[in-house]
Image (cartoon, rainbow, N blue to C red):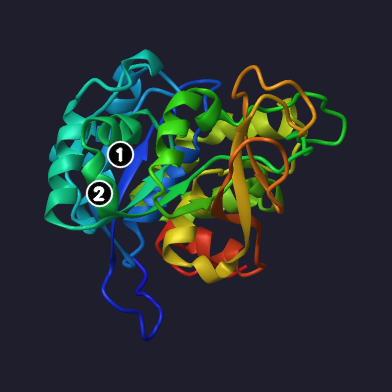
Amino acid sequence: MTAPPPGTTAPLDVWIDTDPSIGIPCHEADDGFALIQAFHSLELRIRGISVSYGNAPLAKTARIARGIVEQFGGPAGVSPARVFAGSPSRPDLGDATAATKALRAALEARPLTYLALAPLTNLATLLTLHPELARRVERIIFVGARTPGRRFTVGRWNPYEFTDGNYHKDNRAAGVVLRAGIPLTLTPVELALHLPLRPAELRWIGQEGGAAGQFLARQANLWMWLWRLGFLTGGGMIFDSFAVLAATHPHLLETERRFVTQHHALDWGAPEEHHKYLLASKSPLGRKPAREAEFCYAPKPEARAVILERLAGKPYPG
């Protein structure tokens, strides 16, 4: 693991909510990268990990999360006993789970920053059952939200538009979280377009990153192939790594204050029938109330080396 920069204060107490599906064919691998990146970051003190449905059913995401923690969480002080299963589906919002009970106990012990790499069902359930604990969440870093009018497509000739997955899978939970008024940092999926993980970098991680690096390179090989050939990109999209970077190196992300609201369409002019999009606008347009949040819109050039360093647990020479 790499030491924090000189002058860094005590590690940041964090709770990670995740839905890892690394190793499942045709599923995303980015949660697996983000977990190992967090384990290699001494700026963080991981107080617990909750698991959600999302990229795969809860039984699979919980099994994968516990496996990653069992193999690689030890140096970060995280054991499988601190991995808690949460909501199995969107309709289960409001039902207590092992995850919400553990998160409640952790927040009662100390304030925490919440890294939301999955649908917000687990956090929304906690806030529904225990609204008084909102003041104990110092900040939410959420992988979600969209720039109004910007469609998330990748590749030169690929027309497929990606959804804002974590928001799309439970927009009702997102509404609960927004109304809680907790300070919010957004690392949107569009952020990953600036910094895809290249095949040569994945090979370097596998060669130089020890057992964790070998795991990532082996389990993410098909994922990389799908991104490059299926979506015509230069590499794989590590969406969730930017949430970890926002916690450890916020100065390496370009940010601005934006106004966030739920809306039916990607622009402001469509009928407001359903909360299909979570939009982050530079000005409070539209008829719906908005709240302010910190929106990360681009990584700085140094971000690539830092992410690769944390994935491998050693400095990146490139």
Residue 76 position (above or below residue 175) = below
- Identify which residue, 135 or 61, lies in the foreground: 135
For mark 2, what is the residue? 73
Which amino acid type corresponds to the residue marked 2 in the rendered image? Gly
The reply to whether dot 2 and dot 1 touch (C-beta < 8 Å) is yes
**Relative to 156, is 247 on the left or the right?**
left
Q: Which residue lies at the image location 37% right of the left edge and 75% below the top edge?
A: 4
**Relative to 106, is 264 on the left or the right?**
right
Q: Which residue lies at the image location 55% right of the left edge and 25% below the top edge?
A: 168
**How many numbered discs sit on the rendered protein?**
2
For mark 1, what is the residue? 68
Where is residue 318 drawn, in percent x and y?
A: 63, 67
Q: Is residue 67 something one can see in this rendering?
A: no
Where is residue 131 drawn, in percent x and y?
A: 25, 39
Q: Which residue lies at the image location 57% right of the left edge and 68% below the top edge?
A: 252
Label of residue 110 in the image: none
Where is residue 140 drawn, in percent x and y?
A: 40, 50
- Identify which residue, 74 or 261, lies in the foreground: 261
**Relative to 70, is 6 on the left or the right?**
right
Which amino acid type corresponds to the residue marked 1 in the rendered image? Ile
**Marks 2 and 1, how far apart at CA:** 7 Å
From this viewpoint, which residue is outermost toward the bottom? 7
User: Circle 2 — which element?
Assistant: loop
Where is residue 26 drawn, in percent x and y?
A: 56, 21
Q: Which quadrant of the figure has residue 145?
A: top right
Q: Which quadrant of the figure has residue 270?
A: top right
Q: Is residue 262 something one can see in this rendering?
A: yes
User: Callout 2: 10 Å neighbours few (<14), some, many (20+)?
Assistant: many
